[in-house]
Image (tube, rainbow, N blue to C red):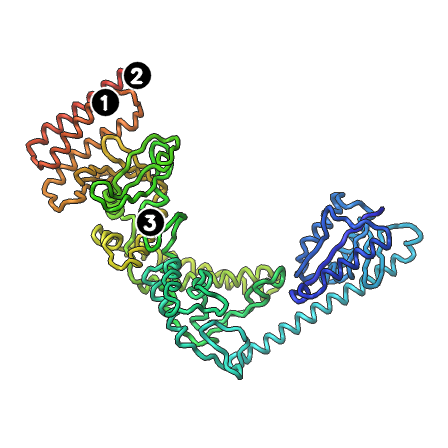
Amino acid sequence: MKKAYSYIRYSSPQQAKGDSFRRQLAATQSFCEKNGYELDTELSVYQELGISGFKGDQENLKRFIDDCEKGNVKKGSLLIVENLDRLSRQKINIAMRQFLHLLEYVDIYTLQDNKKYSHADDDATGDNQLLDIMTSLIIMSRAYEESATKQKRLKESWTERRKNIHTKKLTSIVPHWLELSEDKTTFNIKKDRVEIIKFIYEKCIEGVGVSQLLRLLNDNLEQFPVPSKKGKLWARTSLSRILTDKSVLGEYQPHIGTHKGIGDNKRKPIGEIIPDYYPQIIDEDIYLKAQIARKSRYVGKGKIGKDIFSNLFRNLIKCAYCNGAMEYVNKGNNPSRGGKYLTCSNSKRGGKCSHSKHYKYSALELMLLHLTTENGLMPKPEVPTSLNLKLIKLQELHDKTNSKLNILLEDDFTVPAIKNKINELSREIEQYSSEIEIIEDQLLTYRPDYKYDDLFNDVILENDKLKLYSNRINFNSYLIKQIDEIHILYKYCPFLVFTMKDKTIHRVIIDDKYGFGGCSISSGHYSYKRINEKDNSIDEITWSVLGLFSSLVLKILEDNNENLPLDAEMKKLTKSISKFIIDKDESQIYQILQDIQIAEEYFEQQKSLSM
């Protein structure tokens, strides 16, 4: 039994809603049953649903031809189509080459006119071959002319409608804050809806992210009813669209296709943006400030409690002993048993890690703020300046021009008019890129870095819970952009080792018992800070002692030799330093320095003996 293959194509969603696919497949199956063909199911039916034959974007037809060339489709098999224009509606020279190429491998049968086109070269078929080819030529030529005429009429119709666009509106579906007048000449504004949109923009500029905004809107649905009658709650897509759709500025971008379209019927922009089509409800500067605010936020994966962002180290900090994630633990406010801690999640859950120490969270958090501000890791957010607004306008113009250029490059760019336009757009893009680079350099020069007190106020003291939540998320997001990972370990005192994105290393050491610590800074020195006390009278001396102590601890850590008998000496030294910090007695310094020197010499001696 000879094998047959089916190729089914239709181009519009209306045909999908109708009977086109079922009709073509049923006719194919009926023909095979009557004429003794086995319809191949192994390679499946070759089909293009919602794909135009006018542009030649028929991937599955190309797949069939490829299968013929590779021998997956046996030579002499039959390809069944409804009619020849299902194969192609392109220019006759292109369609004919494809048709003749197919005939080298298979016969082609058209169901609509019961016509078989054969690849055979015997006398019986040879007499009719010329007539068959002439017939196919006429059919394919007519199919191309029909599609070309239809496209031309659509373009002419659209051009004519655009000429009168400000006297009669094109759209019946409009943004939810507008309604089209009965005569279709104007839009009426729904004032209550516009007030909600203005509130959304205001909160976005203040730093409130989409997740928090969603929660705020859905918790107050009487005040902020949903934009769609079908929805019960505000959705992320609706909110994001409000904050990005330029229809709030009055702009209208015509589209062809539908949101659910496939192939050529997918929704895509057509023609230039039409300004002042809708009533403008948001000022352009406010729109641009919202875009700046949105771009400045990034939240990594992880669980976040309602209105709470407890752990500023989220997605960053790991256990130095097993490289597992450190988990935030809140044991409540009980003075004896409560408190906030970071602990190794592997150890907590009975994994391979045996390092079960709970690190006091508050001291670590404050030293993170100190490291951030001392090293200028985070710029202070301010109301966007005229430079910021100019930058984002240039970026939008750059993207828009680049999009126009890409569309032209898909066309025949050997045509002089198109070639000239491509050169013009390329020059514009180059100019925008140059201006963007200049402004970015200026913004870096003027960028104000956070100071410790300001950052402390924004991420710890802020009274507005929603704003505090946003500030902490934004701080964590910015750190994720700057820091590759943080490792925490305990060797006589807590240490944090920060590996930055540029591979530089920063260290933080904390005496969490007495609230004193310090961090490395880009100059190669250390910056000290007393976390829980205001008296800094001997901090510089204290930190010089802690700095020497931390250097010794780092040497021991880097040696990574667990067999060295150093614990007794180091614990004795730790007690001496703690006493010095409490008493603030400068007369103890000489003894402390001597103890550190003795411990270091002892370390070197033990290290030599172990070799």
Choose the circle earlier in sequence order: 2 or 3: 3
Q: Identify whether 304 is placed above or below 341.
A: below
Task: Tell me residue 485's x, y (percent).
Answer: 35, 40
How packed is label 3: few (under 14 Cα within 10 Å), some, or many (20 or more)?
A: many
Kindly identify which residue carries mark 2.
Answer: 611
Which circle marks residue 476 in the picture?
A: 3
Kindly give the residue lying farthest to the left in the view shown.
587
Q: Secondary structure at mark 2?
A: loop
How packed is label 1: few (under 14 Cα within 10 Å), some, or many (20 or more)?
A: some
Q: Secondary structure at mark 3?
A: helix
Q: CA distance from mark 2 to mark 1?
A: 16 Å
Which circle marks residue 95 in the picture?
A: none
For discs 2 and 3, the disc positioned in front in the rendered view: 3
Kindly identify which residue carries mark 1.
Answer: 566
Give the image quarter of residue 466: bottom left
Q: CA distance from mark 2 to mark 3?
A: 44 Å
283 left or right of 14 in image: left
247 left or right of 313 in image: right
* Amino acid at dot 2: Met
Task: Tell me residue 121's x, y (percent).
Answer: 88, 50
Q: Identify whether 127 is placed above or below 610.
A: below
Q: CA distance from mark 3 to mark 1?
A: 38 Å
The answer to whether residue 542 is seen in the rendering is: yes
Give the image quarter of residue 588: top left
Task: Tell me residue 241's x, y (percent).
Answer: 45, 64
Kindly give the residue lying farthest to the bottom in the view shown.
183
Choose the circle earlier in sequence order: 2 or 1: 1
> In the depicted view, which residue is nearer to us: 473 or 64?
473
